[in-house]
Image (tube, rainbow, N blue to C red):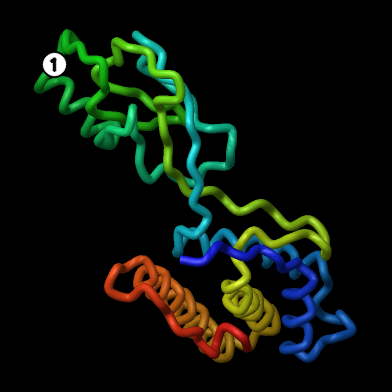
Amino acid sequence: MPAELFTKQAIEVITRVKTQFGDNSGAQLNDATIIRWINDGQQEIVNNNAILKDTKLGDIVANQAEYSFPSDKVQYIEAIYVEGRPVRNLSPQSFRDFILEKDPTLEARSDYPELWYERGGIITFYPVPQKSFTGGLKMEFVRMPDPVTATNSPLSIPDRYLNELVNYCMIQALEYDENYPAAQYKLGQFKEGLDRLHYKENISQSDLYPVISPDPADYV
């Protein structure tokens, strides 16, 4: 898949929304209001499509079970590896049930943990790793989008999601104007757009479809 492009600024969304709404002067929709919608829209997009993927490396310390989340704005962790070995994730409740059933006295020992769970931003491994690995902890996660604060702020979502961010802001503008039928129609466009992009991203990663033709809707 080609490298992501992040070249758009908030002003491009603001201008499109005002134009589509018919309020180029900003008499009804001011910049601050649209910026708030932009931030909500970026988060909604990432909630639906895990596009802000990142990786963090850290150290495994012998006899240390707990590790803090990366300082990055982590939305959720997709996978954890120790020395290249994937570690299975459980919910806190499932983890407790496993320990109570399999090892209530926590006697298990291993160089490599087999399970992890997260609670309150703390990752806990089991068994407690008995060996240190410099750079041996790898976390694959989805980042939260950085908030937009001004008209010249860069967007946190890739350029190909610009149209869907505009659609999200238009939903809010139409609801603000109490034009609920139009807002509902725009909501359908927003959801269809996210589904289309999600489908294209999945297909582009398939060995069966190494090349994807451009979608004309991307350039509207």
Q: Is residue 218 above or below residue 37?
A: below
Q: Is residue 139 above or below residue 164?
A: above
- Horizontal placement of 151 versus 103: left or right? right
The single residue placed furthest to the left in the displayed view is 101
Q: Quadrant of residue 152?
A: bottom right
- Does residue 90 appear in this view? no
Q: Is residue 115 above or below residue 45?
A: above
The residue located at (35%, 23%) in the rendering is 124
Q: How many marks?
A: 1
How many neighbours does mark 1 have within 10 angstroms: few (below 14), some (14-19), or many (20 or more)? few
How far across and how far down the image is residue 11, in percent?
Answer: 80, 71
The amino acid sitting under disc 1 is Asp
How far across and how far down the image is residue 115, in percent?
Answer: 25, 29
Instruction: Name the residue tied to disc 1.
Output: 103
The one nearer the camera, 208 or 65, is 208
- Horizontal placement of 78 versus 68: left or right? left
Element at badge 1? loop
Q: Is residue 14 above or below residue 115?
A: below
The one nearer the camera, 84 or 38, is 84
Image quadrant where one finds the C terminus: bottom right
How far across and how far down the image is residue 98, in percent?
Answer: 16, 27
